Structures are given as C-alpha cells and as structure tokens.
Image (cartoon, coloured by chain):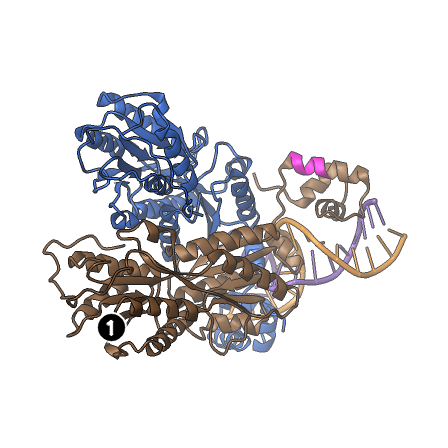
Chain colours: A blue, B brown, C orange, D purple
DNA sequence: CTGAAAGCGCTTACAG
DNA sequence: CTGAAAGCGCTTACAG
C-alpha cells in the first residue's frame, strides 16, 4: 500500500530510474519507446512524485508561501484568493498561513515555510523586526511585503497610499460640519496602523479640525477593540460626532457598540472605515469606506515576487485609495452633540 | 549564504551529524556536554532543519492539509481559522488550500498536498468522486470530510444536520402566512446542496406549503448565482413571498438583486439564509440565518483527523442547526403578492 | 538516448 | 553515549 516510487515505475517500464525521471520531467533526451512505456507504467501505478525528495534534489519547490494577518478579515480573505489565483496561473501553488494578528504565530508559520523551502514568500508582516522576518532576509529567500512593511527591512512591497483616501474622508466629514472626529487607530506595531494615523492627523490639520489627542484610541485591527474604542470615546466630556476606523473589523465592532447604546449611525453619528468590503453596502446604514483594490494588490505582489525570484530588484508598488461615501456619513452634523446612553441591560452577542 | 546544514552544526560543535541530530530532536541518548555544544552551534548558525529532508527520512511531516471550498465565504474563513488554531495546539501546522468551488482546482491542491506528504487532510469536498479524493482514500492517507461528504466514499466526517434548522425556518415562514417560498439551492454536486434541498422539501410537505418545483432554483454557493436566482424567481407568474438561500453568499446576491428592484426585504418579501455569519445581524434589515457552530465543526474535524492518524476509526459527527430569526423574515406576509419591478437604468456594482 | 553513481539533508538501526 | 553507514525518493552531471 506504500505509494509507488520512481523505481517501481522504472521497473514496470523496464528502464532505469534515470530514464523514468527524464520522461516524467519532460526531458527531451528520451526515446519515444521509453516515453510510452514509462508513461503507461506511471499511470498504471498512479505514481505521484514525492515532492519532498524532488525539492531536496532540485533547487525549487514550485510553491510560494503567503502569510496573511487574519483570514477572518474579508480584506485578507480576498487577498488570499487573488494571490492564490495569480500564483496558480504562474505555475505555483500557494501555502497559506494565518498569523491571526500575532507575531508569535507569524514566526511559527514563517519558520515552517522556510523549513519547507518554499521558493518565495509574500507576507503582510506583524510587528517590526520579528526574528523570522530577519531570517527570511538574511537567507536571501525571495520575499515581498504586501499591505504592510517593516521599517529598516529592505524588501520590495505593495502597499496602499492611504493619504488620498483619508484626506477625502476628513474633507467629507469637515464638509458636513464635523469638528471632532474620533479615530480608531490600528496597532502602532503595524506600518498601516502608523501610516493611516499620520495621514489622518495631517488631514485634520489641513481642514482645521480638532486635533485633541483624546480623540485617538488604538485598537488591534480586530472587532472587539473597535467596540472598546467606542466605549472610551463616548466617555469623553466632548464626544466626537464622527468616527473613523482604520479597518473594517474595528468598524464592525464600533457599529455594534453604537447600536447597543441606541446611537443612530447616519443620524447621531457618522462612521467611516478604511477598507471597503462587499458587506459595507449592505449594512444598516450602508457604511462609508475608503477603497483600495485588493485585486491589484494581490496581483502586484505575485508579479513582484516572481521578479525577485528571477533575480530582479523590482520597484515598490504604491496603490491609490479613495473615499466611497455612503449613508453612514452622508448627512449634516447633528445640532446637539452625541450623548452617551447607558448600554442596555441585556448584553448582546459579541463578534467572536 | 546557503542555509546551514546539520553537518555544519556538527562540525562547529565537534561531534558527528548523528549526535547533532539526536540533540536537536530531543533524543535522551546524549551527553550534557554534547547537548550544550550542539545547541550553541545551532544557535550560532541559525540552523533550521530542512523539513523536506526530515520528512523524507521520517514517516511524518507534522503538517496537515485543509482544503476549503471558498476562502471568501465567511463560513469557510472562520473554519480555516478554527482548524488552524486547533491543529496548532496539537503540534501540527496547517497548509490551507482554496478550491474556489472548483473541482479542478481541488484536484490540483490535493495532488500538491499528497505530494508534500502531509500527515492528514481535512477537506470540504467539491463534486463527487473526483480522482484526487479517490487517490487520498486508495493510499490510506488519513482524511476527514468537513461540512460536505462524498457519497460512497467511506471517510469519517463532521457535518451539519440541516433538518432541524430548515424545519424551523419553514415553520417560521408558514407561521407568518407564507405559502410560496422560493428556494435558492446549492449545486447538486455538493452534498450540502442536496441535503438542504431535501430537508427543505420535507419541511414544505410537513407544513402543507406549495411544492411547486418552479420555486426551486439552483445556484453554485457564490453571490452572483443568488442574484440570478432571484431574477428568475421574480419572473414567475406567482412569485414567492419568501426566499430561502442555501448559503450566505447566495443570500447576499439575492439581497442585492432585491434591493436593485426596489423590493423591500422584511416588508415585501422575507429572506432567510442557511449559515449565520457575523455580518447578518448588521445588515439592512438584519438577516434571519440558520446557525450551526463553525467552531464546533472545526475542532471536531481536527479531533477526528488526529484519531484517524492514530489508527482509529472514529464515528462521524453530526452537528445541530437552528433558526435565528431577525427582521428580514419576522413580519406577516404582505397582503399583495410581490410584483417584479424593472431593474434601475444605472447598473449597480456587482459583488466581485 | 541510456544507465550507474553520487548526492540533496536528514534520521536511525547497528555496533561499540 | 557516540559514530559510521545506509537509506528515504528523487535528479543530474558523467560516461558511453
């Protein structure tokens, strides 16, 4: 019941293992007769070459690794899908790992991918300067950063220029009369967390909005932290009239919290989120998003990785972002400021 | 720049490769002195054992494969997350593949997983009797089916008993006065597609609702097919007053299509979906779902796989489902039947 | 066009 | 406790 080896195929075909190998790998230095018999034998035995043995001998494994920050985040699920399709078209299979926004889990997966000798890695990195990222670079393993980068690590990257999108968002809110915008930031350990906050701060200044540091609360890109951020923003003496979340999951947490308090989004308070995922347009009310193309990002990442694997040194790619206004923010600022209402006595189900 | 091998470590430590191997794999037959020097040398050289070589020599690779039907489906994204965490706790790393609801892509990934000699595979199978599934079984590779099964293939499985949930859903709709329920079925090539349709049909009979076969339209579990299904249901002489979709993505497609036509969900028509994902409660109106625990499913799948890998023959696991009523269906049937309205002149963005 | 041989990087009986 | 040797399943110069 042990799987057939190339020796079994060779024996059945009456040739040497070397010839069998040549036939099966498409080496032209084979006779038609040998080809026919080896191919027949391989089919007969349902032969599947042992990829480990092959990779051990060759320099390549025809596989790449993709490490996303969180598969449950629709942005990364879409990214995984796009990268997978693009890689498949180029003849590579993708091994997908999920860091779950944890640096430790990222290290574990990257070690595994390194050990399995993937030909290259696309990673949306957690934290800065984790040991496994350093290993990747030190070994010269072809690597591309996607969505996020790590400062001081010189690796080609595909990122979003958050500036335009956030400037449009703040202009949009200012235009509707908002002065105090609560900002739910990503973690400062993520480059996207830092960049989006910086872009937001610049945009506030440009439009002369309130730069009160109490309006900025840091989350971790996951839903629960969005709820927590809203709780603390509502405790301010002067709560914001608009909330801007640095990703879709924190926005969802924020929306849930606001609903529990009976605060009406699109009436009492405006909500805007970075990222623009399919569900936003179906929400109640439809959520304003800052869109950037996950499809373009995934395809560019694969293109860059193939270039790096070919020994090139491709330029980084920077993709645009832009506001997609919807009902959650498309209204004039309410006359009276938002007042925090005590949460209902029966707790609602939390996002898991 | 080539990665260090165990020979390099052994040389630096002044021992044989055999001893280095023993130390690094925790074999107790090693002297404290050897341990200290080998460990130091390994750290010095940042040694990462070549997993391919190790797996070639040992019988196991400490990795499992998980093949999901569609990563962009939140149900499977959550499943991937749960399986990954449960496997990690048991010391296994998960290689995730995405079939994208394509039997061909499934075969490609399964071949890759087989070639890489994963220790076991958890698969939500596409179609019935694909060649790669047959290979899995023929080779005795530990396999567990999750969510879906393949008829005639005797493999332990973790599935949802859709009967209770669908019976509750139909009872709920009947109780609100609906007689004609449009059913957007999953593909007949998926066991879940067949089972849910059968359960729905039984429930209709139980409650004496209209069994008109024109009320059943088949989709492919992806969003666009939900939109298409609604289009054809609305063309019926007597269109349904309620729509039941066999998964969340088709429900989303249905919702979009209804909105484009100006048909009000929760007022003109009821919508219910199999699966109950986080976004449903945030939609406009909140969507009634049929819930089953993805967490329980993922953990059970890992538990069963570990049992199979240990040579056991675990019993299949069948998980319950139940209705979670929300505003999309919690209203009395409208006095006048739904009338199809022509779509708006400006086409809206479609789910990608 | 073909085969014998060496080797990819590990691990593991087998002696000692 | 340790080392020399064999071997996991492939591929690829090297001869012929």
Nearer the observer, A337 or B85: A337
Residue placed at 47% from the left, 37% from the top? A126
Give the residue pinned by disc 1: B180
Look at the image and tell me whether residue A156 can be seen. Answer: no
Quick check: is A75 in the magenta stretch? Answer: no
Chain label for disc 1: B
Name the spot of residue B265 as percent of width and height, x first: 23, 58
Image quarter of residue B181: bottom left
Look at the image and tell me whether residue A167 can be seen. Answer: yes
Image quarter of residue B55: bottom right
For the N terminus of chain A, the quadrant is bottom right
Q: Does residue B23 lie above or below B214 as drawn?
A: above
Nearer the observer, B294 or B16: B294
Q: Does residue B203 lie above or below A184 as drawn?
A: below
Q: Which residues are magenta?
A: B39-44
Name the spot of residue A332 as percent of width and height, x first: 17, 33
């Amino acid at each position: 019941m042990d799987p057939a080896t190339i020796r079994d195929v060779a024996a059945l075909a009456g040739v040497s293992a070397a010839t069998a190998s040549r036939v099966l790998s498409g080496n032209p230095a084979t006779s038609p007769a040998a080809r026919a018999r080896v191919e027949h034998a391989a089919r007969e035995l349902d032969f599947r070459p042992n990829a480990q043995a092959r990779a051990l001998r060759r320099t390549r494994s025809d596989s790449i690794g993709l490490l996303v920050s969180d598969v449950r985040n629709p942005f990364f699920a879409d990214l995984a899908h796009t990268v997978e399709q693009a890689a498949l078209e180029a003849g590579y299979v993708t091994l997908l790992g999920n860091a779950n926004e944890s640096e430790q889990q990222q290290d574990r997966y990257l070690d595994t991918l390194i050990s399995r000798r993937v030909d290259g890695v696309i990673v949306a990195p957690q934290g800065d300067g984790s040991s496994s990222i350093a290993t990747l670079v030190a070994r010269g393993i072809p690597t591309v950063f996607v969505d996020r980068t790590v400062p001081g690590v010189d690796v080609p990257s595909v990122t979003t220029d958050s500036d335009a999108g956030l400037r449009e968002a703040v202009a949009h809110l200012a235009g509707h009369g908002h002065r105090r915008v609560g900002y739910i930031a990503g973690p400062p350990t993520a480059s996207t967390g830092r960049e989006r906050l910086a872009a937001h701060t610049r945009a506030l200044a440009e439009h002369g909005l309130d730069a009160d540091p109490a309006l900025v609360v840091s989350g971790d890109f996951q839903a629960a932290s969005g709820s927590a951020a809203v709780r603390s923003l509502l405790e301010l003496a002067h709560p914001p009239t608009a909330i801007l979340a640095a990703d879709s999951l924190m926005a969802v947490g924020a929306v849930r919290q606001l609903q529990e308090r009976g605060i009406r989004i699109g009436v009492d308070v405006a909500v805007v989120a970075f990222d623009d995922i399919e569900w936003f347009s179906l929400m109640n009310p439809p959520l304003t998003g800052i869109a950037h193309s996950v499809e373009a990002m995934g395809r560019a990442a694969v293109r860059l990785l193939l270039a790096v694997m070919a020994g090139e040194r491709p330029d980084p790619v920077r993709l645009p972002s832009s506001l997609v206004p919807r009902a959650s923010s498309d209204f004039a600022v309410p006359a009276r400021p938002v007042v925090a209402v005590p949460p209902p006595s029966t707790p609602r189900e939390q996002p898991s």
